[in-house]
Image: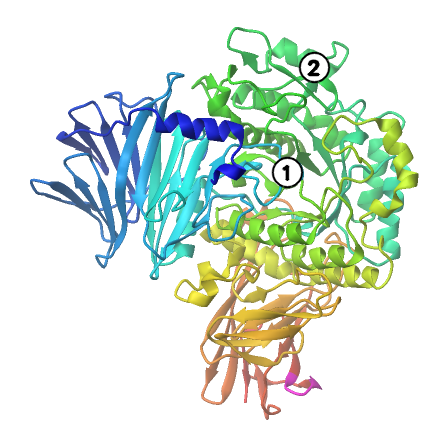
Amino acid sequence: MPPGIRSKKAFMIQTHISQVREFFPGNLVHWTKEGQTFDFHCDNDVILRLSFLTDSLVRFRFTTLGFFPKDFSYAIDPDFQPRQARVNILETTSEITLETRSLTVKLTREGLKTTLLDAAGNVLLNDDKGFHWQQGRDGNDIVMMSKQSKVEESYFGLGDKTCNLNLRGERTVNWVTDSFAFGTQTKALYRSIPFYTSLVDGLSYGIFFDNPFISYFDFASERSDATSFWTHGGEMNYYFFAGNTPLDIIRQYTQLTGVPEMPPMWSLGFHQSKWSYYPESEVLQLANTFRKHDIPVDALYLDIDYMDGYRCFTWHPERFPNPARLTGALSQMGIKTVVIIDPGIKIDPNYEVFADGLRQDVFCKHMDGPPAKGKVWPGLCYFPDFTSPRVRTWWAGWFRDLVRKDGVAGVWNDMNEPALFEVPSKTFPDDVMHDLEGHRGSHRKAHNLYGMQMSRATQEGLKTQGYPNRPFVITRATYAGGQRYASAWTGDNVASWEHLRLANIQVQRMAASGFSFIGSDIGGFAGKTNGELFVRWLQTGIFHPLCRVHSMGYNLAGDEAVDEKEVDSNKTLHSDLDQEPWSFGEPYTAAAKAAIQFRYRILPLIYSAFWQYINEGTPIIRSLALVHPDDDDALLREEEFYLGDHLLVCPVSTPGAKGRSVYLPEGEWYEFGTGNKVKGGQEVWQNADLHQIPIFVKAGAALPLYPLRPSTATPVTTAPDVRIYPGKKATTSVWYEDSGEGYDYTKGESLLRKIEVSKNGNTLEISQELTGKYTPAYATLILHLYGLATKPEKVMVDGLKTKVAYPAKGHATIEVPWDFFRVSID
């Protein structure tokens, strides 16, 4: 981090580190083995516990105390099961070698330095200084690890950062922070995910530093030949992943830290939000305007002004006198209601939630006893300790009326860093204590975990009170593993072209960090957007798993306490701040409508990619470098990305553009819009006026598209399109379907299709393998064949000759049963 962009706090920390003595492990005196875990004891009380969780995943845990404290982590999925790994051991006078079929760990007897190699003997990673520590003035050690960095090594992941996609040359911090209108130099954002993937010379590995204290990462910034990570407190505890590709690494990390359930289908539709829509009549008018313009929408959001004095779990008696009436009317239109719930509980003895919280003793307290209080939207508040199971259960119970009586379908957790007004740190002081599942600790340890555990408690409430419906939670703050409980958005961004580009990179980076259910505030939260920027942002956001427009509305003061009378007057004065799809007039309304409608067409692709994410750990959004690690040109591209296996998107992110260049990796490609073939391994120019998005499809793909609907509440009864793009190699595409709601899919009520497109001589074959008991509501599919040199002479569907239509040159259509087995085209 260059001095010119350091915060004062970060600069003081770095100066302090340089003035104190460093300590290192001593000499190995003996080692022990229990199962797949090895303890290496040094003569200065340092112990390294090395645990093989699989053949390619090993955990390194150091202690300087001579013993290990009780093990505890919120990040690791409780359902993760280590797999049997046969470990061969070889000892010499200078080192110990531990070898599985996928990974070799070499450990020096002096200093416990490590070298890690893959199955072919390639060196993946060498220690530089290795593990070392300093004695902090507050009693907590500063634990550090430094590794060698190769000249061309690239780094990806680390959650939500605003720098280039490749982290090389960056020095950054993980400290969950309310970063209103953040910029490209903002280091501390809303999420802490200390996991990264390395790529060099076609080799990949990953490191997950599971320590929730404030942590720092240096990716060959201070020294070009070294990468390091360190933290002020806790243990040096990290996991090392070996794999053939970056995607292999990310899959392993995601399986270790967990995945969500299948989301409700409506949560993948288009969402409209603003600070704030009120009163009830305005919300209904908003919904009716969507239907009037024939623009699909699945969810409308209510920001803090729906509450009575910003008190959680209440409704403003004048603005929303009958919540069930409103949510019922929206439901009749196929629209869900999502409401915001913050962690701050207003200090008010007449407020039921506060009074019950006092009785139940649920609030965070200072070390010397009194509850921790801070000012947020309602004024002075207390804050539940979500790191206590008892408190999470208490919190979950408050969703009963909100869900069962008032008809709320989803919950949006904001301000849960936790964020406080009028204090320099923006959050709790260090002496606030947390339960941490009985491992009681200070806010220094719990801070990065607080938002994650709040979203966990919220999910529990929605799942318990809304069963059998699937829960939908969106959170601002989280930690590694938080993907198990909630979706997220990238926070309070700015209406600018720079932030449109950032949104694209941030979503890619979060997906590469195991957190795929992510999106941005489309159009920008702070500031004033315009029609062109809004449309281009929509054309990016419709490919992100979470697709939500959100803005600051008429709250011109920004991230401060709100004067309601001033906001009401601004509604009249600043209607140019509206960010609905029709707010900018033509031609922008038509372009926005087309983008949102396209989102609904590609929902089967998004839902299927979600199934892959949950079942395999594969990111929904994939950067080119992760898919093509051997392609040097792909390594340099930041704006192109994959949605799922076969769709490559390159949004327009500059004003006034009529097109843009797109890099296509090696292979055969098709333009999505025209069906024309394009050769890969080159940059191509793609025309893209306001209504166009540069999209390409890998040859061999079979892409399902749904017919247009006003929302996902309308069942698909007419035949979906399946676009077939023949290639030279046999290629399999995955299409997953279920009811989109409820849990019958866990009992076999789902349909997994594996559609293979191949060539057998001059015959094009399309075969389908079906698994599951779910029966769709449509009877047939329309196959669209592209790239045909001539009209087929004969088309057979499951042995019967079938009619073919020819909408355009090189394009044929065939209607087939939804459960066809094989189609052959000669």
Front position in the image: 338 or 640: 640
Q: Residue at x 55, y 18 (%)?
A: 429
Does label 1 or label 2 sit earlier along the sequence?
2
Q: Residue at x 34, y 29 (%)?
A: 143
Left or right: where 491 falls relative to 106? right
Q: Tell me if I can see residue 136 in this picture.
A: yes
* Secondary structure state at the residue bearing disc 1: strand
Q: Residue at x 86, y 62 (%)?
A: 586
Residue beneath label 1, please? 473
The kind of residue on which mark 1 rests is Val
Check disc 1: other Cα within 10 Å, few if <14, some if 14-19, many if 20+: many
Q: Position of residue 383 (x, y in %)?
A: 62, 19
Front position in the image: 168 or 604: 168
Residue 494 vertical position relative to residue 368 in the rendered view, above or below: below
The kind of residue on which mark 2 rests is Phe
Residue segment shown in magenta: 806-811
Residue beneath label 2, please? 354
Q: Position of residue 40 (x, y in %)?
A: 19, 32
- On the image, which quarter does residue 584 sit in? bottom right
Residue 390 vertical position relative to residue 40 in the rendered view, above or below: above
* Secondary structure state at the residue bearing disc 2: helix
Q: Position of residue 221 (x, y in %)?
A: 41, 45
